[in-house]
Amino acid sequence: MSFDAFFSSSICYGAGAPAAGWTLALPITLPLAAVAIAYATGATRLWRRSGHGRALRVRQALWFAMGWIVLAAALVSPIHALGERLFAAHMIEHELLMAVAAPLLVAACPAAALLWALPAGFRRNLGTIGHGKLLRMAWAFVARPLNATVIHGIAIWIWHIPALFEIALQQGVLHYAQHASFFGTGLLFWWTLLPRPGRQQNYGSAVMHLFVTSLHTGLLGVLLLLSPKLWYPQNAVGAALWNLSPIEDQQLAGLVMWIPAGLVYGGAALLLAGLWIRSSETRAGADALRPG
């Protein structure tokens, strides 16, 4: 099998394949299976070592399971195969990766479980590497909320440049790189913004960055919706099968990016704004009770 064939994203099986089949390409299915097995192994080991906080771990496991299912649905289910022939399906796939699977997996805090799936010696080696000065400096830079928001935004806008988008449709490796950059920067973005103990002071910043992301992704969606020009002709070859013209397919994709995705970012911003107000009230009450 050639290199390009190995990274083909069109290895599909099922009724109507490849138009509506399941994508079972090994570069997709093997990592998904490996992550699921590793998480289950590590979570079981952690569960056996401690009985404290079990309700929290059950909740985190449920977040992880939901995130993994959404991720698998985006990459393996017929959504993926349709996404190569219908731009609206392609957009749904991207939003599932960035706005649904990524925040669910971040909320699960899976790092501990994944590390405990590894042998003890390997965990110690990873800990040593993770404490390296250059790696810590690089992570501290990209994990700043502003930088994570900019990196995520750049990934979204660059891959929607028509020439680059259509090249990615033709080249399997670039198609994988596109999805990996959307999902990877999405994980980084949500990791820096979602609330965790000790980060209550960052709620205001998180609200702003979610609002900005909602605005610029909504703008891209509106441009797709209102543009009289077809941006990605190659990604609309199957529109007629769904009784859509290519431009209607593009308009539907723009609506998906503008409204459902915008609701996710906007809803998260409202949730964090509520937590911000509540934490501010709690701190104000504690200050009022403090002597002097």
Image (cartoon, rainbow, N blue to C red):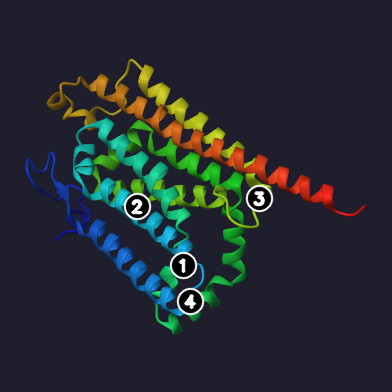
Q: Nearer the viewer, mark 1 or mark 3?
A: 1
Q: Nearer the viewer, residue 239 or 265?
A: 265
Q: Position of residue 115 (x, y in %)?
A: 44, 72
Cα distance between the residues tagged 4 and 1: 8 Å
Q: Quadrant of the N terminus?
A: bottom left
Camera-nearest label, 1 or 2: 1
List the residue tagged with mark 1: 54
Q: Quadrant of residue 82?
A: top left
Name which residue type carries label 2: Met
**Residue count near mark 2 (Cα–Cα under 10 Å), binned few <14, some 14–19, many ≥20:** some
Q: Amino acid at mark 4?
A: Ser
Give yes or no for contact between labels 3 and 2 (Cβ–Cβ under 8 Å).
no
Residue at numbered disc 2: 66
Question: What's the residue at 61%, 55% (across, down)?
Answer: 141
As measured in the structure, the alpha-carbon distance from the residue carrying label 4 to the one carrying label 3 is 27 Å
The type of residue carrying mark 3 is: Gln
Say which residue label 4 marks: 50
Gap in angstroms between the C-alphas marked 2 and 4: 24 Å
State the image coordinates of residue 278 (x, y, percent, origin top left). 66, 43
Tell me the mark number nearer the camera, choosing from 2 and 4.
4
Residue at the spot of label 3: 200
Distance of label 1 from label 3 (alpha carbons)? 24 Å
Labelled pair 4, 3 in contact (Cβ < 8 Å): no
Which circle's residue, 2 or 4, is located before the other in the chain? 4
SS state under label 2: helix
**Are discs 1 and 3 less than 8 Å apart at CB?**
no
Give whichever of discs 4 and 3 has the lower sequence position.
4
Identify the residue at horizontal 42%, vertical 50% (top origin): 104
